[in-house]
Image: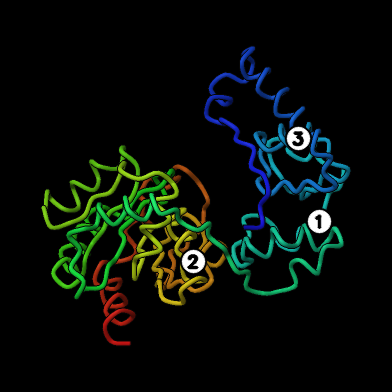
Amino acid sequence: MLIDKIFEVDLSAWKSSWLSANTFYDIMKLSRDLRAEKYDFAFDLHGMFKSLVVSAFCGAKKRVAYKDYREFATLGANVLVKPKSKRPHTYYHIMQRNLDLARYSGLEGLCDYETPVVKLPPSSDIAREHVDNLLSGINPNKKTIVFAPKTTWDTKHWDKNEWRTLYDTLKHDFNIVFTGAQGDLDLIEYITQGDIHSFVLAGKTNLEEYIEVIRQSDMVISPDSSAAHIAYGAYCENNRTKIITIFTSTSKHTYAPPNSCPFPLEEPECIPCHKRKCKKRTQACTKKTKADEVAKKVYELLINN
């Protein structure tokens, strides 16, 4: 692990009550804790108001941000960098964009590679045992695919009927494991139609166990979400875990993990809009990729290779 310390911030609570006494107290406490570390650099990789709050009060000597940040996020920085690509960064990968801030700051030796390697934290024996119990019914003679069908934006979601068709196509030849939060169960129920042969782990794992589930899988299929990026970390470890990412409102050229197979193959003209709501009210991007295309790629990667 290259991270020595993590500071937890309850952003959802802050966003619901920015002007409350509790939020003010939390910000001041975080500021004291960060300043006590005497950091040399702070890099704002998010570029929104919520990251401004952290960067402005962290006390780092150099607080680095891009000039094109929104919601006044540039006010938290004392070093502003002109980006190589303009929003919405359609053809410039977010990994390289983030590393550019470090390169600009003279830290080239730490980021002089084209494809960064992601290292996942090791799983504890307790986490592995819990996951093994959850997956005790797995058929060892079949490859295991994780379906992670849901994320935060509605416009990032693949059409639920395509998910159902893909599940029906693959369920006899592969172990299908569903991950996610408790709130994803309605969608998973729709996809599986109550099929008792699927492994539904949504809401049953913490983050460490969630990572272990992905680490044990042969493939992860997801929209533009954390599951795909954790799967890339698993691939960096085992050179085995395949990734299929289904993009809708965001750009596959910017956010797809380096070794993934991103869909759609041909993007609609409106992609990427990077909007939480479809201005055309058609949600066309969520229906562009078809289940039979994805299924064909699954068999190609897991069976035919």
Outermost residue on the bottom side: it is 305
Q: Secondary structure at mark 2?
A: helix
Of tags 1 and 3, which is closer to the observer? 3
Of tags 2 and 3, which is closer to the observer? 3
- The residue that disc 1 covers is 82
Outermost residue on the front side: it is 125
Q: Residue at x 52, y 29 (%)?
A: 12
Q: Where is residue 102 shown, x and y percent of the image?
A: 78, 59
Q: Residue at x 57, y 19 (%)?
A: 17
Q: Residue at x 76, y 58 (%)?
A: 83
Q: Where is residue 184 shown, x and y percent of the image?
A: 30, 42
Q: Are marks 2 and 3 in contact (CB under 8 Å)?
A: no
Outermost residue on the top side: it is 21
- The residue that disc 2 covers is 232
Quadrant for the N terminus in the image: bottom right
- The residue that disc 3 covers is 34
